[in-house]
């Protein structure tokens, strides 16, 4: 019996747009697709067709890594713009890469797929996210075994049973978080919850407990063996830390490119989503980050930083224009993907700030 996934899930798995998936389906380039109403359904074991528009060979494509979790502010939809704004000398004069606030790691994996660096450093102050990165790197097979169990148990249940199972695993995850035990179990539950929770959010309360409700997905891909194995290989020479972004200072030098993707400054009172951890990231933190950016720039470190554009709601709000007045500020179009209301998802402008 063929198991299917939606076009949205396929797009996330293959790291392409949902529209591109629909085009591939309509061009009959994906075998055994089906339709439910006006929705495309793609076999879960289908392989991504080779894109004739891109000069990549099948072996390289198969070995590529892509984000293994959904993440608020993830950059999968902005990769083309980010890559177009990389500094000159990537992989040549620039031999080191660092990404504090790594999140889902879309740019990290895109660069690891394309370049070979002498050293790579990633960090995030979300210790549970970093635990997953570390587990993928150090014990991928153990993680895959735990995910396989979760996948199989979840798939046996009807919709009501899956909802109940989700909340059981959420409670279990929070117990492990508080007890700080068993890194692999915590990592597998983190991925499971990310794949089955509402909108792929990671949100915690002030006690640090994950509190996102269940989502409604048919056949979510919980255990993506091929991708996790690819990621594990690419992380073997990567320094992974759970810490404040300032820790990168000891790593960064004139041969380093650093990408900062901090929690975005909210555009209004209702758009705030900075609860990746029990601590917030407010305007004071944004100012401290800008000062740190200036400090690294003085050392000759090449840097790119993303953030929200206050001009979306108030053209006179020059918060970032003033903070980074000495640097190259560009406004780019980006898709806002995470919002509880579908009508509030759409194109906005974001800032790219670089010192080169």
Image (cartoon, rainbow, N blue to C red):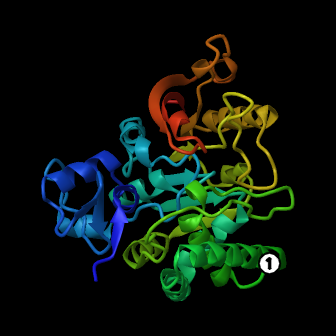
What residue sits 70% from the left and 78% below the top?
Answer: 168
Quadrant hosting residue 219: bottom left
Please state the horizontal and vertical placement of residue 118, each as a whole percent of the image. Answer: 46, 61
Q: Is residue 64 left or right of residue 256?
A: left
Q: Is residue 118 left or right of residue 179?
A: left
- Taking the spot 59% from the left edge, 49% from the top edge, the residue there is 72
Above or below, 81 against 46 in this view is above
Q: Residue furthest right?
A: 207
* Residue topped by disc 1: 175
- Identity of the residue drawn at 51% across and 89% down: 145
Splitting the image into 4 quarters, where does residue 280 fall? Answer: top right
Please state the horizontal and vertical placement of residue 49, each as a whole percent of the image. 19, 61
296 sits to left or right of 55? right
Q: Is residue 3 visible?
A: yes
Question: Percent x, y for residue 228?
Answer: 45, 74
Q: Nearer the viewer, residue 354 or 101?
A: 101
Q: Nearer the viewer, residue 227 or 157?
A: 157
* Residue located at (29% from left, 75% from top): 45
Q: Is residue 94 left or right of residue 259?
A: left
> Which residue is nearer to you in this view: 251 or 216?
216
Quadrant of image for the N terminus: bottom left
Which structural element holds mark 1? helix
- Position of 229 relative to 320 (above/below): below
Instruction: Measuring from the top left, give residue 26's x and y in whole percent.
Output: 17, 52
């Amino acid at each position: 019996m063929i198991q299917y996934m939606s076009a949205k899930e396929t797009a996330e798995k293959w790291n392409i747009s949902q529209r591109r998936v629909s085009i591939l389906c309509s061009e009959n380039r994906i075998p055994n697709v089906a339709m439910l109403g006006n929705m495309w359904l793609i076999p879960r074991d289908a392989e991504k067709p080779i894109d004739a528009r891109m000069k990549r060979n099948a072996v390289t494509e198969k070995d590529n890594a892509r984000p293994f979790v959904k993440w608020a502010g993830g950059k999968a939809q902005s990769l083309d713009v980010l890559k177009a704004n990389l500094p000159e000398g990537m992989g040549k004069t620039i031999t080191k890469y660092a990404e504090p606030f790594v999140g889902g790691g879309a740019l990290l994996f895109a660069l690891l797929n394309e370049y070979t660096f002498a050293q790579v450093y990633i960090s995030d102050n979300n210790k549970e996210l970093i635990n997953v990165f570390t587990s993928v790197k150090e014990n991928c097979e153990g993680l895959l075994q735990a995910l396989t169990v979760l996948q199989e148990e979840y798939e046996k249940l009807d919709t009501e049973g899956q909802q109940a199972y989700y909340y059981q695993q959420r409670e279990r995850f929070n117990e492990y978080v508080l007890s700080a035990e068993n890194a692999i179990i915590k990592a597998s539950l983190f991925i499971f919850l990310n794949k089955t929770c509402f909108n792929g959010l990671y949100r915690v309360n002030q006690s640090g407990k994950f509190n996102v409700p269940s989502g409604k997905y048919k056949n979510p891909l919980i255990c993506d063996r091929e991708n996790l194995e690819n990621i594990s290989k690419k992380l073997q020479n990567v320094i992974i830390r759970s810490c404040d972004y300032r820790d990168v200072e000891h790593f960064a030098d004139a041969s380093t490119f650093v990408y900062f993707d901090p929690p975005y400054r909210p555009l209004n009172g209702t758009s705030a989503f900075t609860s990746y951890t029990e601590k917030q990231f407010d305007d004071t933190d944004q100012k401290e980050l800008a000062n740190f950016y200036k400090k690294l720039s003085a050392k000759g470190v090449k840097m790119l930083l993303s953030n929200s554009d206050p001009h979306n709601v108030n053209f006179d709000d020059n918060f970032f224009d003033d903070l980074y007045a000495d640097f190259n500020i560009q406004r780019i179009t980006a898709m806002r993907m995470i919002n509880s209301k579908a009508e509030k998802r759409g194109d906005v402008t974001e800032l790219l700030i670089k010192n080169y």
